[in-house]
Image (tube, rainbow, N blue to C red):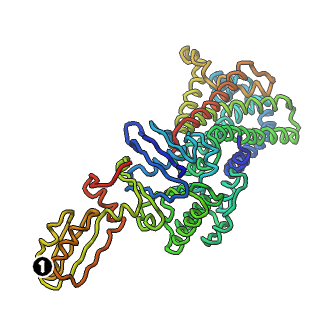
Amino acid sequence: MTAVIECSGLTKFYGKNRGISDLTLSVDKGETFGFLGPNGAGKTTTIRCLLGMLKASSGEARVLGERVTLDGAKLRKRIGYVAGEVHLYDRETGQWHLDYVAGFRGGKRLLEKELIERFEYDPSRKVKELSKGNKQKLALIIGMAHDPGLLVLDEPTSGLDPLNQQTVFEVVEERVRAGATVFLSSHILTEVERLCERVAIVREGTLVAEESVAGLLSRRMRDVEVTFGEEVPLSLLSEIPGVKTAEQPSPTMLRATIKGGDMNALLAALASHPVRDLQITHASLEDVFMEFYRDGEPEGGEQS
Amino acid sequence: MSWHLLKATLYQRRTALLWYSISLISYSVMIVWYYPIIAKTDLKGMLDAFPPEMIKFFAGSDVSLFTFGGFLATEYTGFIWVLIMAAAGITFATKSYSSEISAGTMELLLAQPISRQALAVTRSVALTIYLGVLVLATVVPIQITAIAMDIKYSVSHVWLFAGVGLLMSLAISGVGMLAAAASRESGKPAGIVGGLLGAMWVLNFLAGSAKWAEALEPVNLFKYWDSAVILDKGIVAASTWWVLGGVALATLVGSVIVFSRRDVA
């Protein structure tokens, strides 16, 4: 696989304040890569370093095979960017903005008309008259109208209603099918879960995990609920290695949250009693995400 | 340079350009229209009683108030016009860089395929055109009104004034561009340049009476601005061209270099 984004030891300090520290990650061509972290974790700093808006204090970033510099005009021709906080020119219309950005790209606006229709956006209105959702739609159209090979999306569905969120998901999935690579920074974990194949989690400027969404979920928490055909002690589950919490709602029912991929100990314990019903659910990505932040220190994950 | 950005930049400044132009046209017409009335009055004796420093403070020159150039300089081009041009230029400068950064719209621009150098050079060219239009909004109405009022004036002196005036405006605005290119706050560059200009103006006034102020004159832009002499005699010292041109060029080039190397976020 060809790497579209490569960060190697990327570090950015604002004076003495940390932005990101020693960030190393790689995003392959055609991949939808999620970039997760709470406010102030360094997500936007990373994106701005990748786009050449900020100069890295040390380390290197390569995007689409080119080393990122402050002056990467040629590189930005192939990138579509939707900023986390949408800032537009209030006095100008949406159409003015579309013409403005298209002018820098040699008039390239392959998807503009289609996106306007799909988002049901009216480009004739001035930005100052637009709702937050409509500004977000305009930002999305601006970022994607030239059909870029790399989409860098920072909270792309912020302020959108569920219908338009769905449209964003569909458009992103279509772009990926057409060969585009997506770097998605988001707080909305359901959208990351839906769109992304791999995620990186940053905390206080440092990468704490980078792996596939499926892998992250499968090796994380499971909620187990078992109904037995007879009374059982709570210790049946609470003493299994990896059990984080266990409770007994009734004498014949046990509930537990189990961390880790090894289910054999659980199955062995269950086999010693008649089981009437068994329900095992994976923790959501949100639960996984929270696990990384709950106690200040990440409890697991792999750094690469 | 980017023609597309140049057009967009000037388009975005259209309202400010319109209002500054209307102000300058109105002021120019009003002052020239008023000149024949003043020229006929017998205020010369009273004005002779003023110290030359006072006249210089307002006119930037010690030439007579009763010549066309002297009158324009005292009432308009010596002080007020410079203030208007400085305000227009400094506002343009902050809107070119620091205001866009603080408003977040610079991020939209920098996400487009345009190099930092091209962006900054385009902003400087746009500033030159913008100020050029304002200079025209000054000198064209002056000449039209002078012709209409049958006032004798030198066309070449007025165009010479336009040239030096543009250079003076560019020198002041260039300092603004440099400060704005280095800043992320919209008001700070205007404050810095405004303070610097105020200090220069006071120094220019004090230079006639205080030795220490006189010693600082070579670095004072206002020393090189004598619109009365330009309009009446058509004389511009070589040092005026060099200093004003040098400051304008150095600060605009400086703004390109600073903006090309800084973090923008």
x, y (%) of residue A40? Answer: 38, 51
Give the residue at x 38% y 47%.
A205
Left-right relation of B153 to A136: right
> Amino acid type of disc 1?
Val
Element on which disc 1 rests: loop
User: Considering only vertical position in the picture, is A147 above or below B175?
Assistant: below
Give the residue at x 44% y 48%.
A25
- Quadrant of res A217: bottom left
Q: Quadrant of the N terminus of chain B?
A: top right
Circle 1 crowding by C-alpha within 10 Å: few under 14, some 14–19, many from 20:
some
Judge by depth and name the residue closer to the eye, A195 or B115. A195
| Residue B187 visible, this angle | no
Left-right relation of A74 to A164: right
Left-right relation of A242 to A111: left
Judge by depth and name the residue closer to the eye, B251 or A76. A76
Identify the residue position indicated by label 1 in the image: A232
User: Considering only vertical position in the picture, is B112 above or below B146?
Assistant: below
Judge by depth and name the residue closer to the eye, B152 or A39. A39
User: Considering only vertical position in the picture, is A120 above or below B60?
Assistant: below
| Residue B189 visible, this angle | yes
User: Considering only vertical position in the picture, is A277 above or below A28?
Assistant: below
Q: Chain of mark 1?
A: A
x, y (%) of residue B89? Answer: 65, 39
x, y (%) of residue B224? Answer: 68, 23
Judge by depth and name the residue closer to the eye, A295 or A200. A200
How many labels were placed on the picture? Answer: 1
Give the residue at x 68% y 50%.
A104
x, y (%) of residue A278? Answer: 26, 79
